[in-house]
Image (cartoon, grey):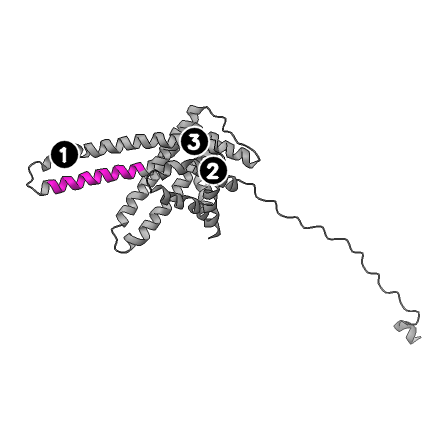
Amino acid sequence: MRDLRIGFGYLVKGQRWIGRHGRWFGIGLLPGLVTLVLYAGALTGLGYGADDLVGWATPFADDWSSPWLSLFRGFLTALVFAFGLFLAVITFTAVTLLVGQPFYESLSEQVDRTEGGDVPESGLPLWRELWISARDSLKVVLRVALFGVLLFALGFIPVVGQTVVPVIGFCVSGFFLAEELTAVALQRRGVELKERLTMLRSRRMLTLGFGVPLTLAFLVPFVAVFLMPGAVAGATLLVRDLTAPEPEPEHRAPAQYQAPSPSPSPSPYSFSKDQARS
């Protein structure tokens, strides 16, 4: 529970950092706005074209009588749009980070600089950083999609599907959201995806404390855009904790030398057994 509280604290600290550095809020806001416009256009197009897409994909139903034809294709249309919305939700952060890679990397460096200590730099050209970010984001999105399909199937289990499964779903989403956000700072430190996942699993409750509240907040329209700069700042602060060198074990002070106590000198009035016999 302590790590949960600390993880949420990093989210709050990140928003406070952005509040104190308003210039970086504007810089970090731009990629989210661009991505939001792109996604809004794509979902609008899907909304208008989903009927035609379903009709093209189901020619075998053209001769069905009413109302079965309308019910069948209406259900598939809603399913197509829901799937598109699901893809938009799970990929929004990854695409925003990809679009804003130079902006968010600069923001993360500034957080390291203001907090003191080393300011790691990847030293890679921009195209290489974009390629690594896109490759890793695709791997993460595929993992999230697989979990999503599995949890969707488990959602049909009575009681468990309506109580436990949604909680697990938010935890999975929060974990991978935290991974995507911390990747900005960890990639600058040369940490690969496999190592990042291992690192976050080792502090799972800390990761969930950061990612799950952010996932819940991102469910509110437009909130993700405004929280993204602070989320990147908070993720950088969290990375500084994860990568901080472990304190060296305390060395025990050497025991002070104690001289052996001198053996008592024989008393002049004591006699040995031989002397007593004589």
Label 3 residue SS: helix
Would you call the spot at circle 3 few (<14 residues within 10 Å), some (14-19), or many (20 or more)? few
Q: Is residue 86 magenta?
A: yes
Q: Amino acid at mark 2?
A: Gly
The C terminus, quarter of image? bottom right
Q: Is residue 7 above or below residue 159?
A: above
Residue 33 lies, in percent from the top left, at: 36, 31
Name the outermost residue toward the bottom.
Answer: 277
Residue 31 lies, in percent from the top left, at: 38, 30
**Mark 1 near mark 3, Cβ–Cβ under 8 Å?**
no
Instruction: Choose mark 1 or mark 3, whichever is in front.
Output: 3
Q: Is residue 43 left or right of residue 185?
A: left
Residue at image mark 2: 19
Label 1 residue SS: helix
Q: Is residue 157 left or right of residue 235?
A: left
Give the residues drawn in magenta, as a range. Answer: 70-88
Residue at image mark 1: 55
**Residue closest to the eye, 274 or 63:** 63
Give the Cα distance between marks 1 and 2. Answer: 50 Å
Q: Is residue 167 left or right of residue 60?
A: right
Residue at image mark 3: 26
Closer to the chain start, of discs 1 and 3, is: 3
